[in-house]
Image: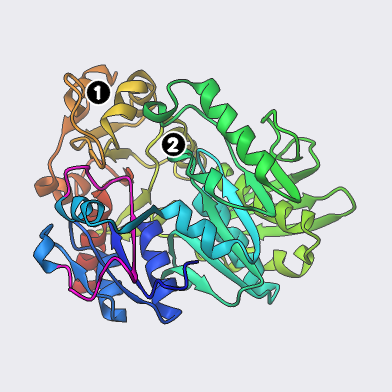
Amino acid sequence: MDKNVIKYFFLGIGGIGMSSLAKYLFDKGYKVMGYDKTPSDNTSNLVLSGIPILFDDEVDLIPSDYNKETTQVIYTPAIPKDHAQYNYFIDKGYSIKKRAELLGEITKDSIVFAIAGTHGKTTTASFLSHLFKYANLDYTAFIGGILNSDNSNLINRGNKYTIVEADEYDRSFLQLFPDFGCITSIDPDHLDIYGDYSEMEKAFTDFSKKISQKLVLASELEIEGFSYAVEKKADYYGSNIRVDEGGYYFDFNTPDRKFKDVYLNLIGKHNLSNAIGAASLMHVAGLDVGKALPSLANFQGVTRRMDIFKYNGKTIIDDYAHHPKEIKAVFNTTQSFFKEKSNKVIFQPHLFSRTRDFIEEFAEILSRFDQVALMDIYPAREDPIPGVNSDALLDLVNNPNKQIISRNNFNSAVEDPKADLVVILGAGDIGTCVENLKKNIHNET
């Protein structure tokens, strides 16, 4: 890292990946501030810790001491190219880097464990962090979600090891220098960047070649490494799986021994796979996974990852799922654990391009729920695409019990008396609707 840099300005500081980096640098003694479009729990927590945040895109608000000689600007792809502050920093010759570049710089002097994959990165990284904690390891973890146990997306317990999520968007994960890696899945996504699936596969192969020591990966993937699986033979696999009310008992099989009757305190076969991936990665690195495995019984989960709570007598499942395969995994979990309950899905599609590319797949899996409610597409970094909207998706949903809802009637959609189980899905600002819902629960108790 540049020794002249003593200040960091984050454009999009409220993002889950950006906020953990901002906190990390602030804790290291750097002067940190940033901009974000909207207030959120993330931005509130940053402000409470002492990090100033601007919510207006005005150049005059940038403090004069944030000069180009001593300031590093970090930006997220969600920042539009016509953003006034972004263009000011470019025009004035500031050093500007993407989040992944900074993450690569921060972590290159530690032993890096990088979690990649179209789905499951955050949960797998969270499991690995949890296992490291109970093995008493010296580590830092940058998590793409808020760990309920710590109420944070940054776990800072030392510098020997670092756990990071390796984001495939824009080939960002190629900026990292991993020692050990895990690939949970490779499914078509971000086709606005890759063009087609073969280019995406190539990027993951390139990522695998950057790993200096060992890689574990889901057994169906055709990349060289140690395989892991659920209920089928692989280098590492789960067997003797028994469903419990709030999770699973299973045996964890490694190349040299079996750990019997491990308990995972989280539902969903996809989450069981993620836990096995994390444990496999720890074992292949030569760390004491046996010491840590019992801690899976007290794993408290990650916000918006199969997050289950009660609201007015209903069971609510809140999940970040925003790809058809992720929605299918959530649906299958509802059928395993809540089949007797009448269900309703509230889904906010994320990105116009993803909705366009997978509109039939979205419609097919959404049609399986008893009721379907769609919010408008969350655009993030994108401009609208003609003809691509939630109405077009709803038209393809083969279910008479379907509707479009707005943010204003989100709560009434949740309170629908015909639904005992409400499943809330999406990677956009639907999360703030859930935050407000939980605040209502807190205020009523």
Q: Is residue 210 highlighted in magenta?
A: no
Q: Identify the residue at image location x=53%, y=56%.
A: 104
Magenta-colored span: 62-83
Q: Which residue position holds label 1?
A: 393
Q: Is residue 296 above or below residue 403?
A: below
Q: Which residue position holds label 2?
A: 331
Percent position (x, y) of residue 45? 30, 73
Q: Identify the residue at image location x=25%, y=51%.
A: 90
Q: Identify the residue at image location x=39%, y=22%.
A: 361
- Residue nearest the observer in this picture, 190 or 62: 62
Q: Amino acid at mark 1?
A: Leu
Q: Is residue 344 above or below residue 244?
A: above
Residue 297 visible here? no
> Looking at the rendering, which quadrant does residue 265 occupy?
bottom right
- Residue nearest the observer in this picture, 127 or 341: 127
Q: Is residue 346 above or below residue 151?
A: above
